[in-house]
Image (tube, grey):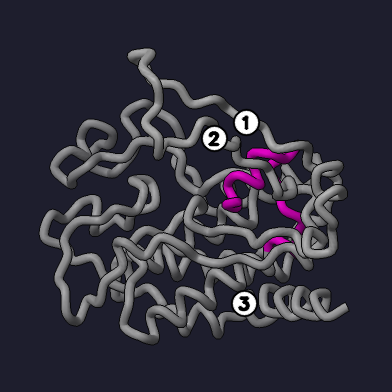
Amino acid sequence: MSISEAREASHNRLFSPSVARAIAAQLIQAVAFMHSRGVVHADLHEANILLRLPSSIDNLTPDQLYKRYGQPELEQITRLDGKPLDPWVPTFGVVPIWFGDASDTMSLADSRIFLIDFSESFQPAVDIRQSSHTPFVLRSPEILLEPTAQVSFPAEIWSLACAVFAIIGQRPLFETWFPTSWANRKQCFDDQLRRLDGSPRRLLEDRLEDSIQEPRRQAEISEMDEEEKQAFLVLLKSMLSFRPDDRPSAQQVLESSWMQKWAQPAFESMKDNLKT
């Protein structure tokens, strides 16, 4: 189950603050490890971040498993042309069962993740790439706007920032169409980069308020306090720097104030919960 599926299964599309921090910490650790080995994942998004099965499943008998999750649902397999199945074709398939928890009911002990889909991963020192398979709205500006820009570590730091924001909040950081090249910017912006449709430019602080703080208030769960909010904004703003060279390395993200004071302690608490 991916974290996006867990969110879709929930009532409010939120993880609890401690679970969200623990998941974000693990993702940052995973990316930092890959980057330290000279590897870029190159397809970083929520659907490629899977949650491990709830630990409680290990203690269920088959009867308890069926009682909690239901009996296997079978689907008969038939040929479209009505002819008999070949001898090696199974007569039925089993519909996948939902083993996961909704994001808003997930416990800290069940917030362990693993990163998947390394089919696009590569080593920038060995392989030069100028195209990205990361979802469009998660790509960095240089990848979107510069045809000759190379996909490398700074581009993934941008995508990592987007992923972390989505984990912590209710909605993704970017949800809109963006020009596919610098030459096409005049379809949306004037020479001062003001939107032609007249809508105001939104600050990151505004996005944090309506995607994290306000949904948490409505769900009656803890908001970010001022200290955490400022540390989170400082980290995100650095990771979302327009110029690639201005973005921190994954190791610097790992050593950031927000990671050390909020995300890492949640991760350590998760590990403690696994021991009990």
Mark 3: which secondary structure? helix
Q: Is residue 153 above or below residue 100?
A: below
User: How would you rate the neighbour count of disc 2 (Cα within 10 Å): few for under 14, some for 14-19, many for 20 or more?
Assistant: few
Amino acid under label 1?
Answer: Leu
Task: Report the front residue among 148 and 266.
Answer: 266
| Residue 72 relative to residue 140: left or right | right
Q: Are marks 2 and 1 in contact (CB under 8 Å)?
A: yes
Residue located beneath label 1 in the image: 74
- Quadrant housing residue 159: bottom left
Amino acid under label 2?
Answer: Gly
Mark 2: which secondary structure? strand
Q: Nearer the viewer, mark 3 or mark 2?
A: 2
Q: Which label is found at residue 259?
A: 3
Q: Which label is found at residue 260?
A: none
Amino acid under label 3?
Answer: Met
Q: What's the magenta region?
A: 1-20
Q: Which label is found at residue 93?
A: 2
| Residue 62 relative to residue 38: left or right | right
Q: Nearer the viewer, mark 3 or mark 1?
A: 1
Query: Which residue is at a point 27% across and 44% down the rendered structure image?
Result: 192
Q: Are marks 3 and 2 in contact (CB under 8 Å)?
A: no
User: How would you rate the neighbour count of disc 1 (Cα within 10 Å): few for under 14, some for 14-19, many for 20 or more?
Assistant: few
